[in-house]
Image (cartoon, rainbow, N blue to C red):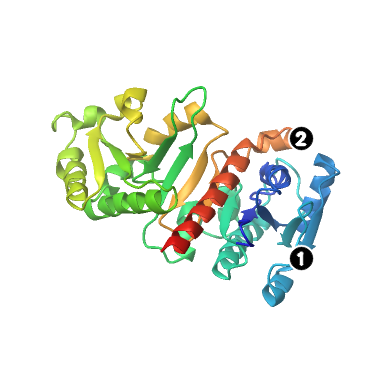
């Protein structure tokens, strides 16, 4: 950190979507709380900034200058942009595979910036998986890509949101499996991987969220959590034995609960995190309660990464600038900055 100010790398995502817009708006709005460093095409961002708010001031530097001299100083009323040039002109709402590799370059640069101590954490705007695949790069998502690039054997995807009108308390939902076809989920739920998932959640809730003794509630895979084997045996054969082992290791893990009844206040008020077995089982509930205010957090990485809870919104971008809501991006940036401060305090105390 630069003094007590977290330095946050922000990858602006798919250029034809709302990512560049919400990145600019959130960075400008929060520039006095942290130091945002945008990673994207400097010329395109400068043009977009003038359309959004003529008060926005950007300072562009090249990747080579960053590598030669590190991150330069910057005033509170100026946002640094590390230039990652695009290969094709941007038409809002219209995907172009020629820009797919440039989008990936922003992720690589954000990782490098953290490893080199130029930045403290990264926040990612939404990207379009199809564009990257069409560019000739096999890509399933941010979570898997960051795990591969940091040589992390296993990571956990978690979405988090604060209390709001629909929620009486904060809600965090982690996933045992991420972007898998539904027919592959049951085979992917294995003892060792599920136990490691619980260990990652427990550790990061302590270190990154400051929760001294995390309480983790686990859903079943099947309707009614298998109903004693009549509706499936995954709970009996894998999930419940993993929960018992996690308890034996000192973790406060409870379940397996039927997913259709777990997401109620009377249960969730006692949970610091819910571990759902697959993507839509847990995230449908969270996004219904907090869409646009949630944060995607990758647990288990050797760095801090948060993201928005929504996609590229190509249809909205096509309508013009000034329509996108930067709320989720602001929450993601604040959560990343809080994690940086919390980890710094832990290091200082140790």
- The image shows residue 188, relative to residue 119, as above or below, that is above
Residue at image x 24%, y 50%? Answer: 190
Q: Quadrant of residue 84?
A: bottom right
> Residue 288: where, in percent of width, then height?
48, 27
Residue at image x 70%, y 77%? Answer: 68
> Residue 58: where, in percent of width, then height?
80, 54
Residue nearest the observer in this picture, 129 or 154: 154
Residue farthest along the bottom direction in this orientation: 68
> Residue 341: where, in percent of width, then height?
53, 54
Q: Is residue 264 among the parts visible in the rendering?
A: no
In terms of sequence position, does the residue under pointer 2 or pointer 1 come before the other? 1
Q: Quadrant of the N terminus?
A: bottom right
According to the image, label 1 marks what residue?
61
Q: Quadrant of residue 327?
A: top right
According to the image, label 2 marks what residue?
322
- The image shows residue 162, relative to residue 348, as above or below, that is above
Q: Quadrant of residue 98?
A: bottom right
Q: Is 4 situated left or right of 266 in this image? A: right
Residue at image x 26%, y 47%? Answer: 187
What's the mark number on residue 92? none
Q: Quick one: SS at disc 1?
A: strand
- The image shows residue 261, relative to residue 41, as above or below, that is above
């Amino acid at each position: 950190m630069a003094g007590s100010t977290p330095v946050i790398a922000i990858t602006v995502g798919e250029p034809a979507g709302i990512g560049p817009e919400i990145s600019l708006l959130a960075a400008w709005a929060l520039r006095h709380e942290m130091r945002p460093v945008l990673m994207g095409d400097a010329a395109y961002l400068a043009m977009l900034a003038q359309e959004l708010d003529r008060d926005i001031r950007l300072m562009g530097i090249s990747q080579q200058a960053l590598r030669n001299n590190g991150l330069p100083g910057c005033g509170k009323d100026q946002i640094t942009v590390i230039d990652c040039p695009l290969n094709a002109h941007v038409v809002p709402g219209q995907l172009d595979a020629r820009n797919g590799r440039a989008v990936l370059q922003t992720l690589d640069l954000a990782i490098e910036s953290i490893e080199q101590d130029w930045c403290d954490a990264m926040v990612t705007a939404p990207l379009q998986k199809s564009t990257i695949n069409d560019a000739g790069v096999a890509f399933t998502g941010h979570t898997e890509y960051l795990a591969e690039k940091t040589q992390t054997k296993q990571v956990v995807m978690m979405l988090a949101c604060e209390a709001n009108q629909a929620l009486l308390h904060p809600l965090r939902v982690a996933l045992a499996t991420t972007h898998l076809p539904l027919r592959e989920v049951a085979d992917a739920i294995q003892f060792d991987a599920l136990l490691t998932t619980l260990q990652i959640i427990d550790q990061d809730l302590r270190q990154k969220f400051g929760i001294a003794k995390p309480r983790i509630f686990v859903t079943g895979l099947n309707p009614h959590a298998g109903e004693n084997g009549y509706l499936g045996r995954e709970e009996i054969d894998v999930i419940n034995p993993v929960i018992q082992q996690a308890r034996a290791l000192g973790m406060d893990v409870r379940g397996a609960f039927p997913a259709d009844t777990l997401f109620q206040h009377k249960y969730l008020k006692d949970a610091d995190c819910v571990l759902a077995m697959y993507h839509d089982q847990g995230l449908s509930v969270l996004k219904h309660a907090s869409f646009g205010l949630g944060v995607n957090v990758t647990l288990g990485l050797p760095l801090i990464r948060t993201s928005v809870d929504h996609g590229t919104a190509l249809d909205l971008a096509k309508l013009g600038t000034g329509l996108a809501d930067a709320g989720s991006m602001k929450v993601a940036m604040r959560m990343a900055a809080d994690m940086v401060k919390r980890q710094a305090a832990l290091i200082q105390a140790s």
